[in-house]
Amino acid sequence: MSATERGEASEALCTNLLASRLMVDAKVVGLFAPLSDEPALHRLATTLHRRGVQIGAPRVDWNAETMEMWRIESFEIDDERGLIDEGGLVPQATERLGRLEPDRLDAIIVPGVAFDTSGRRLGRGRGFYDRFLPRCKRAEQIGVCFEAQIVPEIPTEDHDAPVDAVVTEARVIRP
């Protein structure tokens, strides 16, 4: 997808997500800082912030292979302090105002390289979300991707964590 196509698809995805009512009562939502090939979530973050929703963004510890959510006030991305990994620069949120415990999240938006219609996801291979999602016991777990990333089936292993719904620019999938 070109940058223009990604931008238009990201806007449509955010519209679908907000219209889906998956997060209608959410007061605390975990987002992610998108890589250049992932859906942009700035419109979603802005809308949620205007509604008074607390927003968290992930912070990873590459050595301990853990991920935590940190409350943020703005969705600016700090490319200079991002971490370099095999996949390139992983952006990190700039303002961290305290850790959000996973059981406080009402919803969490989850990236993926691919999803299937059963909510199974293919991540980038490090397992951060697979370890974090089971700790989000009450959160609506929502995968987001472009429609071209929906595949017939994703093979899984016991440690792989599925999501409750998948949202693309074209539809909302509830397994």
Image (cartoon, helix red, strand yellow):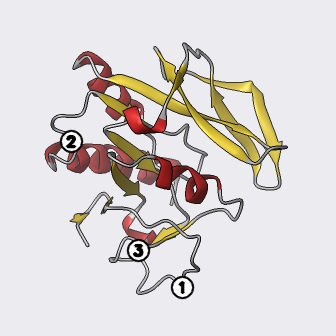
3D distance between C-alphas at marks 3 and 1:
13 Å
- Quadrant in the picture for residue 104: top left
Q: Residue at x 82, y 55 (%)?
A: 86
Left or right of 131 on screen, residue 5: left
**Which of the two discs, 3 and 1, sits closer to the camera?**
1
Q: Residue at x 23, y 67 (%)?
A: 174
Which residue type does callout 1 highlight? Pro
Q: Residue at x 55, y 81 (%)?
A: 156
Q: Nearer the viewer, residue 102 or 8?
A: 102
Q: Is residue 100 above or below residue 13?
A: above
Mark number, residue 150 = 3
Q: Bin the neighbour count of mark 1 within 10 Å (Cα to Cα): few under 14, some 14-19, many 20 and up.
A: few
Which residue type does callout 3 highlight? Ile
- Say whether disc 1 or disc 2 marks the residue closer to the N-terminus: 2
Percent from the top left, x then y, of residue 40?
45, 41
Percent from the top left, x then y, of residue 19?
14, 45
Left or right of 172 on screen, residue 61: right
Q: Secondary structure at mark 1?
A: loop
In the rendered view of the protein, which quadrant contains the C terminus?
A: bottom left
3D distance between C-alphas at marks 1 and 2:
29 Å
Q: Nearer the viewer, residue 157 or 34?
A: 157
Q: Is residue 16 above or below residue 58?
A: below
Q: Is residue 111 above or below residue 24?
A: below
Q: Nearer the viewer, residue 157 or 58?
A: 157
- Say whether disc 2 or disc 3 marks the residue closer to the N-terminus: 2
Q: Read off the residue under disc 1.
A: 155
